[in-house]
Image: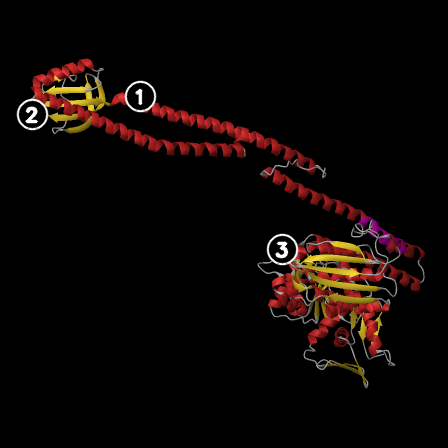
Amino acid sequence: MKVLLVEDNERVTQFVVKGLKESGHTADHAGNGRDGMFLAASEPYDVIIMDRMLPGDIDGLAIIEALRKSGKRTPILILSALSDVDERIRGLRSGGDDYLTKPFAFGELLARLDALTRRAQGEGAQTKLEVGDLRVDLLTRKVTRGERSIVLQPREFKLLEYLMRHAEQVVTRTMLLENVWDYHFDPQTNVVDVHISKLRQKIDADFERPLLRTVRNAGYTMTAQD
Amino acid sequence: MYPFMRSSALTLAVGYICLGLAALALFATPLWYAWRVTIQDGRTEILEADAQRLAEVFRRQGPAGLTSYIITRIDMQIPNERFLLLTDASFKPLAGNLTVWPRNVPAQSGRYTFDVDLGGRVTRADFARVALPGGYNLLVGRDLARYTPIEHRFWYALAGAVGILSIVGAFGGILIRRALMRRIHGIRQTVSAIIQGDLSRRLATSSSGDELNVLSQTINGMLVQIEQLIHGVRNVSNAIAHDLRTPLAELRSRLEELSLTKPSPEQTFAELEAAVADVDRVIGLFNALLRLAEIDSGMRRSGFVPLDMTEVAAAAVEFYQPAAEVKNCTLTMASNGPAPIRGDPVLLAQALGNLIDNALKYTPEGGSISVEVRRGPGHVVGVSVADTGPGIPAAEQPKVVERFYRGDASRGTPGVGLGLSLVEAVARLHGSALAFEDNKPGLRAFVVLQQDAPPGVRGPGISAAQQPADAALLHSTG
């Protein structure tokens, strides 16, 4: 994917640009709001990473609002040192699609960018999800693997649905907390891991090839590949 | 400018004086009017009666009789008490104390007021002119100058009253100001001492309920709050210094050792990963502290919405259920139906999560944890988390909500000692407090929430109790 990074801190820039290139993506960089605005408006990007506090006291949110007003629909991830829940809400209201607080792990950033671009490509009104021989019918809420029907509890179903919608991508624990449980805080324990292992018991335990895999230092991924 | 000029006591005194003067004027005006009218009418009556009497004498005794009567009368009277003049048809004086018929007397009989020349002295007088048979003219008058002293006395008395009022008012103003200044000076001294850093000082108060005393008591209450906050901040900074230094020191030595010993790449990577974990610990600590600060600042009250505490609790219980299963503990939830309150759903969920997490941490395998949400009488909702763990000794209970406090039982367990502080802060934000009870065995932590919003943050006419349906709706979409 093609990423635009609007960020004035050199270290963060270097860290993100290098990480993106190593993951096989192309990244442009703008060090101030004006360049960022210009690039975002003129070049076709898959996703934009926008820092909030830019040189000259410019708030990245103002740029996002301007972009949205001019009709740009490129997904935008807001990067900010402001961690208040209220700030997050303001960020998302201004037209951002996701909000990540500094400091962050690169894995978390990459996973979120993946999720954003995938969402933008539009999976919209999908009613059936499939990874390998695991099938989920969103209408009848039936889960089957191969010939076998699997019974899931509502929350397990929601967890599986989120993982399946982001198949072949890395999904972090924070993303799961936010999207499956709507918990915007760190519960300080490994409860998410426990939920995952319970789900694994049901969908993977009796099968030769596991679909739900742990990605070290990042999170989980649902994949049918080896 | 002299300070007295700026004093509010001066304004007060001047105000009082002006008010007094206005009252005096309002009182004197009708009095003056009544006096004027009475005297005037009296004068006219006397003058007319006199003229009648003289005309009667003329009618009975003729011009000669009246002439002698007037002469006798003038001899007997106080000089100039009455002006009397009788003339013949050609206005030649026959008798009287006026030497000449005044030129400005109108031709008809009647009552007039005009100036008259008394041989050099001009005075204003009331006159009654009577035309007598045979062309004789009679003039009876009364000198108005005789009344001036009385009028003067009235004005002097009024001026005196004004003077006394002003002096008493000014004096009263000074006295009030002095009394006020003495108390304000006391307050100022105390406040200056507090500004200098002596936070233990309090304003002097008495049992009287006067305004300054009530104000002083309110300020004292504020000072207690400020002192506690400052004390808390001081404790926290000490705790931060200690708790942040430890992981930072570890991190530093790890990195320094790396740069000095230059171990094999595999070992370097392992060390680097450990270093990142150290940093993550520090970041976690920072985030927890920032969140506490955010809650303490009270700003989060903007996030208050009607919600159902039972649903929040049920979601939290469901979230922690697998963790309890792994530990072989039972985690149960009990409630007596929906419990609508106004609050911050994110914070309440996190607080409840912390309590459950804590209970899970300290309850031994096979134990049980029960979460309860009960709507009680008097619009309260009680939320409790009870476990069968070792509990917290009564002496330690007030300390566990302090920042970074870690009880003896928690040594060797993960955590930074902020979990219960957060619960306490969230409870405080919702106008409540975290309390503990012996669960025999174990610990029961509970918070009693008011169904209405805490004071000062009530929405415009909306209370959660009135709109349970909305609360449930809002929550289910959240």
Q: Main secondary structure of the magenta part?
A: helix
Residue B249 part of the magenta-drawn span: yes
Which residue is at 31% across, 23% downward?
B150
Q: Is residue B289 visible?
A: no
Is disc 2 placed on a helix, strand or loop? helix
Find residue A41 and report its horizontal and vertical position in percent.
64, 68
Per the image, the residue denoted by label 3 is: B457
Position of residue A142 relative to residue B219, above or below, is below
- The chain containing the residue under callout 2 comes to B
Task: Tell me what residue is drawn at x 83 percent, y 75 percent.
Answer: A200
Numbered disc in front, either 1 or 2 = 2
Q: Is residue A16 left or right of residue B104?
A: right
The label number, if any, that marks residue B149 in the structure image: 1
Q: Which residues are magenta?
A: B239-254
State the mark number for residue B133: 2
Q: Secondary structure at mark 1?
A: helix
Checking the image for residue B433, the label placed there is none
Q: Residue furthest left?
A: B134
Residue B468 in view in this figure: yes
Pinpoint the chain carrying mark 3.
B
* Image: B211 above or below B315: above
Q: Are marks 1 and 3 in contact (CB under 8 Å)?
A: no
Question: Which comes before the other along the chain, label 3 or label 2?
Answer: 2
Between tags 3 and 2, which lies in front? Answer: 2
* Kind of residue at badge 3: Val
Question: Residue B346's image quarter?
Answer: bottom right
Left or right: B44, with B405 as reference point: left
Q: Is residue A119 above or below residue B374?
A: below
